[in-house]
Amino acid sequence: MKLVIFSNVPKRVDCSDDCPLTAIVPVIQFSMKKILITAVLFASLSAMTPSILDAQGIVYVSNLGDTPTGSAAVGSDSWIAQTFITGTNVDGYSLSSVELLLNTPSGNPSGFSISVYSISGNSQTPTFPGAVPQVSIGSFSGPDPTTAGIFDYTTPGIALSASTWYVVLVTATTPINQGAYIWSAANSITTGSFDIENSYFSSHDGSSWTWVPRQNIFQMAIYASPIPEPETGAMLVLGMAAFGIWRLRRIQ
């Protein structure tokens, strides 16, 4: 039995045991090409897999499981902004959603809103007191929290820089004497790929802020995806090219 090449595709046919080397070498070359293409394709798919999973968003930090120890009223005259710090991924992150733990509201509040704000000054090494929420970089959509529970708020994607301070800011359109949303709080720093810090900001109008350290740490979970580094994109292109070659050879 020996291998003979027809159109560069190996097939088995009966022959004597003295197979000529010229018939074997093309088979070896063909097999090596298949091995190399398969290896490159596997490597590229391996590089793609985290990005595919992350496209749905993965939880980077959460203190939703902590025991609540306090809360704060949220309204048009009571803005709350919880600080957090992003991770070290060089190209930054795409923020996809947040979850908030909210208690039963009081009265008849309306117009609940949630957004992410940057921090004034050097946002990687801010000075407190001094740094305050500066400008909204994106908002979320989601339900009106008319009961107690964990509520999910989503966004098409908010770009966050690496190792940078931000705040998750909540407010409403009604004053708290008419009705207030109640954001649950714990009392410990939560670390993960991101960190939820032990400080927050409060404001009566969204323009003048008070820094409040080492008290309530409002309960939330942050979902994001790492922005792929250039090497991942290059591996993807290489993998697609290898896949194209592999498909062409199968057709031939």
Image (cartoon, helix red, strand yellow):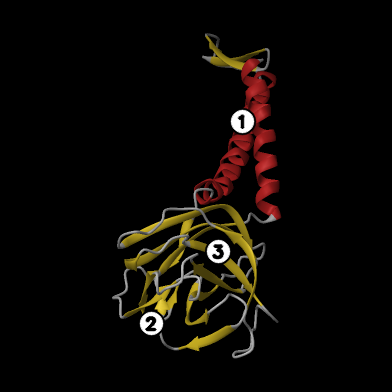
Quadrant housing residue 36: top right
Q: Quadrant of residue 37?
A: top right
Query: Is 60 on the left-hand or right-hand side of 43?
Result: left
Q: In the rendered image, which residue does mark 1 sit on?
A: 34
Mark nearer the N terminus (3 vs 2)? 3
- Density class for disc 3 (Cα within 10 Å; few <14, some 14-19, many ≥20) is many
| Residue, far bottom | 129
Q: Is residue 50 above or below residue 90?
A: above
Residue depicted at 64% across the width and 84% down the height: 131
Q: Earlier in the sequence, mark 1 or mark 2?
A: 1
Q: Position of residue 172 (x, y in %)?
A: 48, 66
Is residue 93 in view from this perspective? Answer: no
Residue 249, horizontal then vertical, whole percent:
66, 21
Residues under labels 3 and 1: Cα distance?
51 Å
Q: Position of residue 43 (x, y in %)?
A: 58, 45
Callout 2 amino acid: Ser
Please name the residue that numbered disc 2 is placed on.
188
User: Considering depth in this image, is 177 or 209 the residue closer to the camera?
Assistant: 177
